[in-house]
Image (cartoon, rainbow, N blue to C red):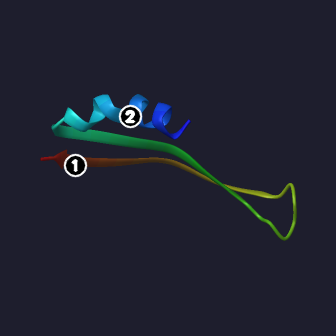
Amino acid sequence: MREAARNEVRPLYDQRGEWTLTVTELVGFDLAQPGEQTRLAGPWVFHFRVP
């Protein structure tokens, strides 16, 4: 199974250049109170370069 997961990501290894990652929402769960969620609305946009 680990090999299959690695194969799915492998094409991204050669994707160099400018990238943009957009996070639209973060969701956190409170382990002390099951069922409770904290939601933070985005978006957060990260720009980076892969050499």
Quadrant of the frame with the N terminus: top right
Q: Secondary structure at mark 2?
A: helix
- The residue to which callout 2 is attached is 9
Q: Secondary structure at mark 1?
A: strand
| Badge 2 amino acid | Val
At x 20%, y 34%, the residue is: 14
Q: Position of residue 35 (x, y in %)?
A: 86, 54
| Badge 1 amino acid | Phe
- Label 1 Cα crowd, 10 Å radius (few <14 / some 14-19 / many 20+): few
At x 46%, y 36%, the residue is: 3
The vertical placement of 15 against 39, above or below, is: above
At x 82%, y 58%, the residue is: 36
In the displayed structure, does residue 11 sit left or right of residue 43?
Answer: left
The vertical placement of 47 against 33, above or below, is: above
In the displayed structure, does residue 49 sit left or right of residue 40?
Answer: left
Cα distance between the residues tagged 2 and 1: 19 Å
Find residue 26 and name its label: none
At x 33%, y 33%, the residue is: 10
Q: Position of residue 28 (x, y in %)?
A: 67, 58
The answer to the question of whether label 2 and label 1 lie on touching residues, with beta carbons closer than 8 A, is no
Q: Nearer the viewer, residue 45 or 17?
A: 17
User: Which of the two labelled residues, at mark 2 and mark 1, occupies the earlier sequence position?
Assistant: 2
Mark 2 vs mark 1, foreground winner is 2
Q: Position of residue 41 (x, y in %)?
A: 57, 49
- The residue to which callout 1 is attached is 48
Q: Position of residue 6 (x, y in %)?
A: 42, 37
